[in-house]
């Protein structure tokens, strides 16, 4: 009898464990069988995971903290010209493994929302693929944003995005990535490519972009106009890592305007090549290259650009210190042009083989050049001040 009771107890216990496991499993929404994510969200508790498969023709709004939506087998959410996903104030939301398409906007995070996006594609939306606003924050890993009729990724109104893994923003009709109104983006352990848009990346209106580590490369290529624009009191920081601006057809590789800064530290590098106009262009702005003692120097490499390698207008500054380097070669006009009261300080740099002068200084500009530089040709007029032991005096013949 004892053995019988023991067997019954084991059987009942096993049944209870099995029922508990089934109860704990994530709800499955199969949109191809008429189920909806909207219905599942209405019943979702904070922290709940919802698995989704099929093509879901609906728009969804997330208010619940901690909700996790996981797409399987190429799951699609099709917005039918309405915003596909809206996250309103919810925290710790996760979306993974979906294509969000054919909406007004692909995804909007607003009202202080916080979300993590993994393995998402946001495409073919009438407005932008992804918009972040109202002091919201997103972490994006391995995401693609493409073919949207306004912008790829918008970060606005004191919001912040962190991008890691693979990031691709392409074939959008205006910007691939745009920051406005004190927004920020951080690239960490990222390979980010912004290509074939009308304009590549714009950091605007007191916003900032950070490249956080040596493993990160941000490439702006084959855009119709400028690859990377920093404007209106904004800053681009590269602490290690690399910015590549190449083959941007009609304008510059990298441009900083209206009291903006580009700071390269600890080996941070800009490679600007084969752009339609200047590799790096400054107006009323600063390009600052420096390094801490014992760490690699920062670099700018400009080559094959349709006009100047680097240019500085309207009291701009190109300022190198420590082990930093500029290499500007084989551009179609000047290697470096400084005009209208701008300032250039070069160390350890090579300027040679350009179709115009390798260094051209005009209209009240100033230069600090020493013998560590390799400069092929230099021209300057009688309004220019020049110092250093590089062997040049102004005006040149």
Image: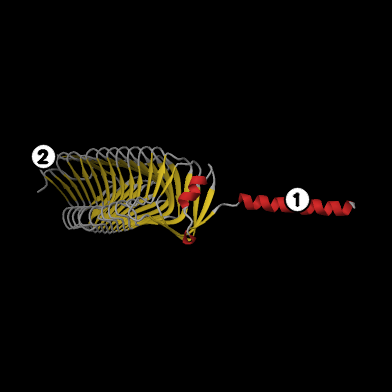
Q: Residue at x 26, y 37 (%)?
A: 233
Q: Which residue is drawn at 76% across and 52% down?
A: 12
In the rendered image, which residue does mark 2 sit on? Answer: 383
Numbered disc 2: secondary structure: loop
Along the viewing direction, whichever of 74 and 391 lies nearer the viewer:
74
Residue 51 visible, this angle = yes
In the rendered image, which residue does mark 1 sit on? Answer: 13
Q: Residue at x 29, y 56 (%)?
A: 172
Q: Is residue 149 left or right of residue 90?
A: left
Along the viewing direction, whichever of 151 and 270 lies nearer the viewer:
151
- The color scheme shown is secondary structure
Look at discs 1 and 2 and give the one toward the viewer.
Answer: 1
* Image spot of residue 173 (x, y percent): 26, 55
Q: In this view, does 362 lie to the left or right of 5?
A: left
Q: Does 379 sit above or below residue 99?
A: above
Q: How crowded is mark 1: few (under 14 residues within 10 Å), some or many (20 or more)?
A: few
**Residue 212, image quadrant:** top left
Q: Residues within 10 Å of mark 2 (few under 14, many from 20)?
A: some
Q: Residue furthest front?
A: 34
* Image spot of residue 327 (x, y percent): 28, 52
**Residue 344, image quadrant:** top left
Along the viewing direction, whichever of 88 and 371 lies nearer the viewer:
88
* Image spot of residue 342 (x, y percent): 18, 40
């Amino acid at each position: 009898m004892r053995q019988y009771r023991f067997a019954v107890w084991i059987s009942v216990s096993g049944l209870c464990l099995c029922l508990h496991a089934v109860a704990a499993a994530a709800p499955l929404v199969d949109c191809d069988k008429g189920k909806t994510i909207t219905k599942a969200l209405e019943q979702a508790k904070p922290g709940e995971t919802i698995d989704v498969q099929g093509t879901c023709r609906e728009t969804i709004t997330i208010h619940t903290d901690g909700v996790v939506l996981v797409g399987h087998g190429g799951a699609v959410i099709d917005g039918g010209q309405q915003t596909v996903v809206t996250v309103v104030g919810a925290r710790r939301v996760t979306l993974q493994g979906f294509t969000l398409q054919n909406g007004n906007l692909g995804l909007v995070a607003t009202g202080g929302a916080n979300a993590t996006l993994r393995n998402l594609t946001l495409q073919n939306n009438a407005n932008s693929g992804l918009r972040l606003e109202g002091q919201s924050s997103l972490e994006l890993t391995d995401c693609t944003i493409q073919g949207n009729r306004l912008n790829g990724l918008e970060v606005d109104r004191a919001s912040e995005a962190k991008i890691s893994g693979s990031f691709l923003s392409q074939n959008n009709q205006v910007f691939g990535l745009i920051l406005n109104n004190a927004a920020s983006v951080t690239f960490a352990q990222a390979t980010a490519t912004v290509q074939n848009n009308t304009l590549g990346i714009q950091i605007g209106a007191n916003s900032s972009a950070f490249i956080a580590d040596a493993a990160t490369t941000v490439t702006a290529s084959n855009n119709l106009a400028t690859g990377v624009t920093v404007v209106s009191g904004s800053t681009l920081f590269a602490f290690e890592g690399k910015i590549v601006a190449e083959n941007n057809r009609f304008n510059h590789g990298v441009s900083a305007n209206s009291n903006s800064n580009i700071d390269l530290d600890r080996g941070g590098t800009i490679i600007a090549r084969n752009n339609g106009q200047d590799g790096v262009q400054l107006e009323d702005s600063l390009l600052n290259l420096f390094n801490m003692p014992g760490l690699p120097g920062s670099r700018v490499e400009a080559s094959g650009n349709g006009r100047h390698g680097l240019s500085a207008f309207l009291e701009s500054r190109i300022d190198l210190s420590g082990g930093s380097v500029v290499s500007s070669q084989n551009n179609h006009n000047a290697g470096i042009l400084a005009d209208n009261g701008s300032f250039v300080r070069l160390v350890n740099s090579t300027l040679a083989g350009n179709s115009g002068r390798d260094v051209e200084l005009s209209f009240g500009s100033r230069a600090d050049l020493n013998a560590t530089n390799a400069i092929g040709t230099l021209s300057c007029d009688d309004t220019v001040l020049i110092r250093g032991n590089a062997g040049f005096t102004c005006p040149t013949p």
